[in-house]
Amino acid sequence: MIVTVINQKGGVGKTTTAVNLAYALSKGRNVGLLDIDPEGGTSFSFGIRRDKKEFPLGGKSVNIFNIEIFPAHLGLLKLELGGEVEEVVKSIKSIAEGFDVLVIDTPPNLGTLAVASMIAADRVISPVTPQPLAIEAVRNLDSRLQSLEKRAIAFASMSKKPMDIELRAVKFVQIYVPPSKLFSESSRLGVPASRYEEVKLKKPKIAKIYEELGKVALSE
Ligand SMILES: Nc1ncnc2c1ncn2[C@@H]1O[C@H](COP(=O)(O)OP(=O)(O)OP(=O)(O)O)[C@@H](O)[C@H]1O
Ligand SMILES: [Mg+2]
């Protein structure tokens, strides 16, 4: 199963979602995490620098916390600028064959890599921050999903309450991830916030939210 995290607005929590969702789903499942964003946010979150070499998509991986991570590399930029959507879809599907779930972190645009990740997806998840531009972005995503005959779930990211916006292809679930400094602290250390919290705090809160998101995503 392919779970794509998408929102063309930058900085809304896509990478944070992909990383923590992969971590939540990896308990009891064989999980891959594909960083298809040439900026390499997911790779950075695990302390991996973007590779200056070029690989084919899925050509290089590293296992951390029992998640098989496919870090960003220079080849992604070439695909973004000159790749064929259909070819990228094929590559993504062939990577996913090796896993129970492949989570994909996408760049903040609707270019070749993001669109291919959306087409390849069995489940699409969109984090949305409670700001006018992020809401506008999810409205545009809704139109795009409709034209592709796909559906997505959305949740409130960096928000103190859930969001409820009526759209056609995007369904808002009653899940929200509150603002927390644990995200920046953990990112600096190269570990998912859910993992960091498990080690540091007695009562994990963040991990529970991503477990719930994982359940909803897989069941929708
Ligand atoms: N719930 C949260 N509370 C506080 N900070 C958060 C939260 N979620 C994410 N962040 C922080 O917000 C910043 C942006 O998040 P993230 O990188 O996940 O967004 P993104 O959508 O992937 O951005 P980009 O579009 O640039 O790839 C990061 O510094 C991250 O640590
Ligand atoms: Mg990102």
Image: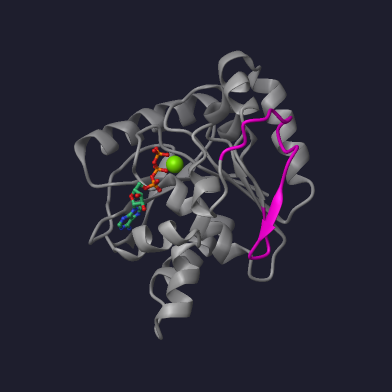
Instruction: Give the residue at the far left of this rendering.
Output: 132
Q: Residue at x 49, y 62 (%)?
A: 192
Look at the magenta stretch and give its main secondary structure: loop
Looking at the picture, how far across and down is residue 140, in whole percent? 36, 28
* Percent coordinates x, y for residue 161 in the rendering: 24, 61
Q: Nearer the viewer, residue 109 or 69?
A: 69
Indicate the quadrant of ligand 2 in the picture: top left
Magenta stretch? Answer: 50-68
Give the image's coloring scheme.
one colour
Estimate the x, y position of residue 126 in percent, counting from the top left: 42, 44
Vertical position of residue 7 compared to residue 26: above or below: above
* Residue 202 is a magenta residue: no
The quarter of the picture where the C terminus appears is: bottom right
Q: Is residue 220 above or below residue 7?
A: below
Q: How many marks?
A: 0
Give the residue furthest to the bottom: 202
Q: Residue at x 53, y 53 (%)?
A: 47
Using residue 162 as the reference point, say whether residue 13 is left or right of it.
Answer: right
Left or right, 136 with respect to 117, comes to left
Left or right of 168 on screen, residue 165: left
Left or right: where does residue 165 sit relative to residue 193? left
Q: Quadrant for residue 142, please give it.
A: top left
Residue 175 visible in the shown view: no
Residue 29 locus on image (x, y percent): 69, 65
Evaluate whether residue 191 shows in this view. yes
Residue at (70% x, 52% y) in the render: 62
Q: Residue at x 66, y 17 (%)?
A: 84
Vertical relation: 211 (above or below) 163: below
Q: Which residue of the protein is positioned furthest toward the top in this rendering?
A: 82
